[in-house]
Every structure is written in structure tokens, then in C-alpha cells.
Image: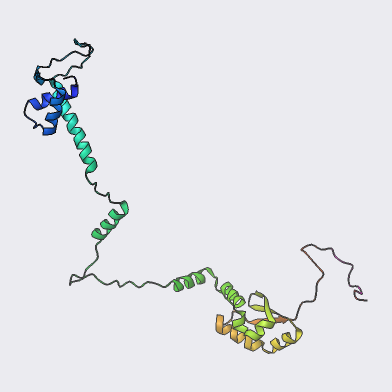
Amino acid sequence: MNDPVAEALARIYSHGRVPMPPNMRKVLESTTPTGQNADQNTTHTNGAADKDGVNHKTVDKSDEGNVGKKFDKDDNSKNSKDLPRAKTPSATSVFREFSRTSRVYPTGPDGHRRKNTRRYESLGSIVNREVVRRGWTEKISHGWITANWSTVAGDYLAAHSSIRMIKDTTLFLECDSTAKASELRYLQTELLSRIAQHVGPDVITAVKIFGPRPPSWRHGPLHVKGRGPRDTYG
């Protein structure tokens, strides 16, 4: 037998401890010369040539078990690839399962879970308390009047007037004509009552109404002082 692997297998199966498969017997018989037993083959030293000039490696009896372990290891590795692998759980699923099973709720005398008696505060009340604490009530009221001027004054007055500014408790209005400015002055008391209904009393206590602004020839933030009033149109 010239194949060292076949020779090692023949030695392993010759002891009778491991049953030899039928197909392995055919393979060993095909590699073994006729009229020669596998146990009668002489071992050679590494690097030493026989009569045919072929080098053979020494196969000791101590290596028989190692060869068998090697083939068993290869078989186990092949079988492990064929076996289905269990899916590794993710950290999120483990945390959810732990939270679900480890959460403890207080129970009543009947063994049922107690109802939550805590009263949650609404977001609006929290915001209102913070606005009062920081002193933003006046500024927020002024901003609401400016943004909802059509609601406070009505669509007709809002179409012909606009808010110039709000200083302290005084509202400054600008009308698009002197006639509308005069009309709005007669409605000043009613306008103050409407404002008090929407934003509360003492937020706006006075209203100053102006007519349209005269045309200006000034352009840009910088200008040169003129020589005074002249006969511009003469």
C-alpha cells in the first residue's frame, strides 16, 4: 500500500474497535496489492527510499488515534455546518422581555392591580404658570393684540388701520386716511372694552390714533441735514 492515509485507515479498522463501512472496504482493497495484508506492510523512515525509489513517511501506532481524531473532527465540522443554528436574540428583545417579567405593580387587597390615582397637570397650566413666574404676561398680551388685530377691532376697522407700536399700556394706531382716524377716535371707548374682553383689564388703558404719514424723500439709514424748509413746490 503506497498511500499513507489508506495505510492508517487499514490499521485503525484492523483492530475491530471501529466498524468499517462497506464502501471503505472496497476502497482499501483497491489500494492494497493482491496477496499482501495491510498488517504486513513495513514502515519506512522519513526520507528513506525503498527498492522502487519511493519515499514513505513513518506511520507509528501512536499516530493511529490522532488520525482517527482528525477524521472525527472533520466529520463533526461538516455536520456542524449542516445543523440549523439558533437565532441569537437582540439586546432590545432581551430588554423588553426582562422589563415585562420583572415589572412589579402594587396590588390591592383583592390581588388586582391598583388604579393610578395621580393627577397629571395639563401642558397649558404648566406654560401659564411659567409665563407668570417669568413676568411675560404683558409682552404676550401685546403680541396677541398685534397678531389678532382683525379679531379685536373687526374686519372693517382693521382694513383701514394698523398698529404702529405698543408702549407700556398705550396703543398707537395709524389709519390710512384722516377720515378713518376721526371715525376711530369716536370708537375709542368701545375699542378699549373689546381689548379688555380678549386680554384682560389694565393691559391697554389708552389709545393714540394718527393719520397717514406724509411722504418722505429720505432713503436709507444715513442722510445729510438740509438747509431748512424751502418753497419745494413753488
Foreground pick, 74 / 210:
74
- Rendered residue at 23%/69% (across/down): 113
Q: Quadrant of the C terminus?
A: bottom right
In this view, the residue farthest toward the left is 16
Question: Where is residue 161 drawn, in percent x and y?
Answer: 69, 81
**From which residue to which does the magenta span run?**
224-231
In this view, the residue farthest toward the right is 234
**Direction from residue 107 to residue 157 in the image, left or right:** right
**Direction from residue 102 to residue 37 in the image, left or right:** left
Foreground pick, 16 / 164:
16
- Rendered residue at 90%/76% (across/down): 233
Query: Residue 80's quadrant in the figure?
Result: top left
Question: Where is residue 114 drawn, in percent x and y?
Answer: 24, 71
Q: Is residue 225 magenta?
A: yes
Query: Residue 19's quadrant in the figure?
Result: top left
Question: Where is residue 188 drawn, in percent x and y?
Answer: 66, 87
Where 181 sits versus 164, above or below? below
- Rendered residue at 17%/26% (across/down): 67
Q: Is residue 39 magenta?
A: no
